[in-house]
DNA sequence: GCGACAG
DNA sequence: ATCTTGTCGC
């Protein structure tokens, strides 16, 4: 990474304390761009992390797919030490650096990024998807499995039904029932896209499960790698009961 | 002060 | 997220 990019990276995500992180979020939220997304792109990416508590480590995975046919192109991973705790509202400071490291290993960079977390549906308007979007400067969509903030009307149990997610009087996202009878998805734009485009993108990524296919692939891979690390770890502890 | 709270 | 067995429902 060049000197210039490294400085930009530090400027966008380097913080030492939660207070500092919150201050940075408020500042960066003003740079988030909401606009229609052009679906005329060719590479979509999705990322997810798995953790290995015994090692205080994470496994970050980024998978890319051709668009719009969603054929898998590449899958890369990065293993590192957790540097920031999980604090509701500050998730991006924990996970974006990890996703970024994996992203750097891609041969072909994505045009659009689907994230496991909120976009602008965040207390300060800067969820993980928005933060990653600003860092990579590409359109990003937030697709969370649970609500962080805001309120919405009751949602029908049928597949495909949706309702707006509000924060005060403003619409910040959409709550979408991806499958009949399952917990809904919380979709919100990250950066360089808007609410309608975000929902449309997520729906085009839905297969037979609750979670969009690209995110499932990234999640499965990260989980598998983490599981292998844990197994190798427990095997060592059996053959090497002590170090002396 | 009392809840709520992405992964 | 992670720890965990069996088990309730489509």
Image (cartoon, coloured by chain):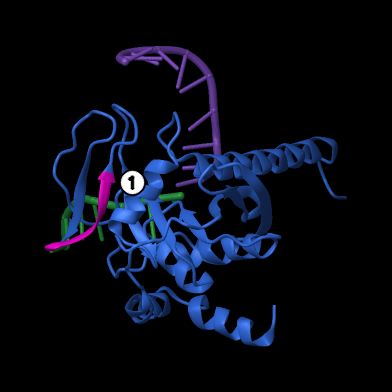
Chain colours: A blue, B green, C purple
Q: Vertical placement of A86 versus B6: above or below? A: below
- Seen from the viewer's position, the closer of residues A195 and C2 is A195
Note whether residue A52 is visible: no
Q: Main secondary structure of the magenta part?
A: strand
**Residue at (45%, 76%) from the top-left corner?**
A17
Q: Hey, which residue is sitting farthest front in the picture?
A: A40
**Residue at (40%, 66%) from the top-left corner?**
A130
Note whether residue A241 is visible: yes
- Seen from the viewer's position, the closer of residues A84 and A177 is A177
- Specify the subunit that label 1 lies on: A
Q: Position of residue A136 (x, y in %)?
A: 53, 70
**Residue at (69%, 83%) from the top-left corner?**
A2
Q: Vertical placement of A182 versus A136: above or below? A: above
Q: Position of residue A158 (x, y in %)?
A: 24, 28
Q: Position of residue A182 (x, y in %)?
A: 32, 31
Helix, strand or loop at label 1? It is loop
Q: How many marks?
A: 1
Identify the residue position indicated by label 1 in the image.
A146
Q: Position of residue A239 (x, y in %)?
A: 85, 36
Magenta-span inclusion, residue A127: no
Looking at the rendering, which quadrant does residue A79 occupy?
bottom right
- For the N terminus of chain A, the image quarter is bottom right
Q: Vertical placement of A10 versus A194: above or below? A: below
Q: Which residues are magenta?
A: A168-175
- From the viewer's perspective, is A31 left or right of A109? left
**Residue at (88%, 50%) from the top-left corner?**
A244
- Seen from the viewer's position, the closer of residues A26 and B3 is A26
- Seen from the viewer's position, the closer of residues C5 and A99 is A99
Q: Are there few (<14), some (14-19), or many (20+) residues within 10 Å of tag 1?
A: some
């Amino acid at each position: 990474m060049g000197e210039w990019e490294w400085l930009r990276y530090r400027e966008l995500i380097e913080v030492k304390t939660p207070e500092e992180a919150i201050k940075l979020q408020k500042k960066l939220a003003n740079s988030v761009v909401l606009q229609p997304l052009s679906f005329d792109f060719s590479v979509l990416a999705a990322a997810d992390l798995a953790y290995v508590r015994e090692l205080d480590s994470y496994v970050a995975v980024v998978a890319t797919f051709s668009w719009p046919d969603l054929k898998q192109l590449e899958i890369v991973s990065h293993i590192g030490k957790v540097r920031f705790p999980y604090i509701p509202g500050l998730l991006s400071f924990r996970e974006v650096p990890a996703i970024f490291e994996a992203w750097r290993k891609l041969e072909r960079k994505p045009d659009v990024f689907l994230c496991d977390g909120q976009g602008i549906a965040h207390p300060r308007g800067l969820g993980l998807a928005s933060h990653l979007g600003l860092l990579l400067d590409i359109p990003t969509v937030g697709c969370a499995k649970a609500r962080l903030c805001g309120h919405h009307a009751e949602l029908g149990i049928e597949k495909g039904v949706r309702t707006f997610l509000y924060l005060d009087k403003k619409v910040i996202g959409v709550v979408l029932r991806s499958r009949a009878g399952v917990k809904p998805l919380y979709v919100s734009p990250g950066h360089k896209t808007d609410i309608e485009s975000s929902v449309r993108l997520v729906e085009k990524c839905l297969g037979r499960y609750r979670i969009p296919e690209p995110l499932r692939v990234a999640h499965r891979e990260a989980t598998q790698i983490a599981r292998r690390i844990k197994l190798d770890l427990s095997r060592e502890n059996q053959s090497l009961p002590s170090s002396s």
